[in-house]
Amino acid sequence: MTKRKLLIGPFNRVEGDLEIRLEVEDGHVAAAFTNSPMFRGFEAMLQGKGPMDALTLTPRICGICSISQSAAAAAALGAAAGVSPAPQGALVTALLHGIENLSDHLTHFNLFFCADFARPAYRDRTWHERAVARFTAMEGSATRECIEARAQLLHIVGLLGGKWPHTLAIQPGGVTRAPSLRDKMRILASLTAFRRYLERVMFGAPVEAFASLSSAEAVTGWDTGDVGLFMEIAADLNLGHMGDGPGRYMSFGAYPIGETRAFAAGIWDAGTLRPLETSGIREDLSHAWMLGKSAHPAKGTTIPDEDMREEAYSWCKAPRLDGQTIETGAFARQVIDAHPAALDMAQKASTVLSRVAGRLLEIARTQIMLEDWAKAIQPDAHFIDNFDAPHSGTGEGLVEAARGALGHWIDIQDGRIESYQIIAPTTWNFSPRDANGLPGPVEAALVGAPVGEQENTPLSVQHIVRSFDPCMVCTVH
């Protein structure tokens, strides 16, 4: 039996710092340990600040999912005050948030994930020359087309939010800018242009055709556009049998408009769907460089352990739901929203292929929703209700970022923030072990990954890690 240890990191094409320690036996990963090596401390920064400061500070946690942070902070403040946004304000919030998530999915597919297929290690594959032409970093034709289409789409955020990232447009009572009829027409024109890009480049067919696929075989058998090229590569590399997750999924529900959410909230566990209940969340600190006790985030603390005790190995806490690990992300959302193809894939396994497929399904479905929301804008309506920050109160803000379930918990006392806790999607997926020795989802998914004798940065490990699309700066807030 041959054994060796590898330390991989920092990973490129990852937001923030990530290291993964591997124990390899007989050419396969026997154990993995994920480390978020950079502490940032946003939760500590918020203590003692005025409640409305959360709307300014939390978007700075991340430069690629800042609207998600804004939406979660506004929801938490609104819950603490017992206030809901104006209906048209909620609609525009969903539009802003959906555009950011759609942009993230597009970026992940073209710039973060598929670039690995252009590596020289795959030069003998029949598809490699096409992958090089399309996905080579900085030079591939798909890369250039993606960047241009993404920039045009984000013009809508500039129109409605003033800027991206870090817009202050989303507030507990709605949004700060009331779009005019001219704005509405410009938004619809931008969405039409983006649809043309998706149908010409990504899918090679109408977005409705991909969104309506009803089985795993229909998804993996897609053969047009860049999605078709990806499915060919995925079949050849066996990505549908790589990186098994826990088989448990969670979604906080995406895009609240009125009493409903466009993508459903819930928990999916081994084929059983049940309502979302957050009271069972605990953040375990046993293997994190954090002081204090494991607790629900409403009662939690963020106190860094400056001595960095030996049994810990990450600044990331280990959130658990009812004592179990859980996977979150676009695939989880599609499973919980009962998309038939996602459900079919979930019955088999959570893999590299299913996570990417979940994003692709969501790209198509979100494009359709964005068009419907833009058409529903009523320029003569009001888009924000008055809001006064409460002198005291607690609130929970639950949204879905591109990478999955994002929760903010705020406690306000005497007009100041007493406590502010955040659990980001990557905190769930890239958590370290807990007090029972249970590895986090990515740590477990890496077990069994093949490692070649000459590989020091195994391609299989990179595919698995990138399938979760880590954002480490959100993890160590």
Image: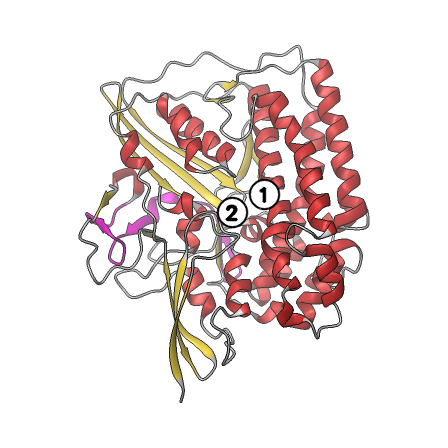
Q: Residue at x 51, y 70 (%)?
A: 458
Q: Residue at x 67, y 28 (%)?
A: 373
What stretch of residues is rendered in magenta? Answer: 267-295
- Labels 2 and 1: the sequence-earlier one: 1
| Label drawn at residue 337 | none
Q: Residue at x 36, y 23 (%)?
A: 53
The residue under label 1 is 104
Task: State left or right for residue 345 relative to residue 226.
Answer: left
Q: Secondary structure at mark 1?
A: helix
Type of the residue with mark 2:
Arg
- Does the residue at mark 2 contact the one at mark 1 (Cβ under 8 Å)? yes
Q: Nearer the viewer, mark 2 or mark 1?
A: 1
> Whole-percent x and y of residue 269?
48, 58
Quadrant of the rendering where the C terminus is positioned = top left
How many C-alpha atoms fall within 10 Å of the one at disc 1: few (<14), some, or many (≥20)? Answer: many
Q: Residue 128 appears in which quarter of the rendering?
A: bottom right
Quadrant of the rendering where the N terminus is positioned = bottom left
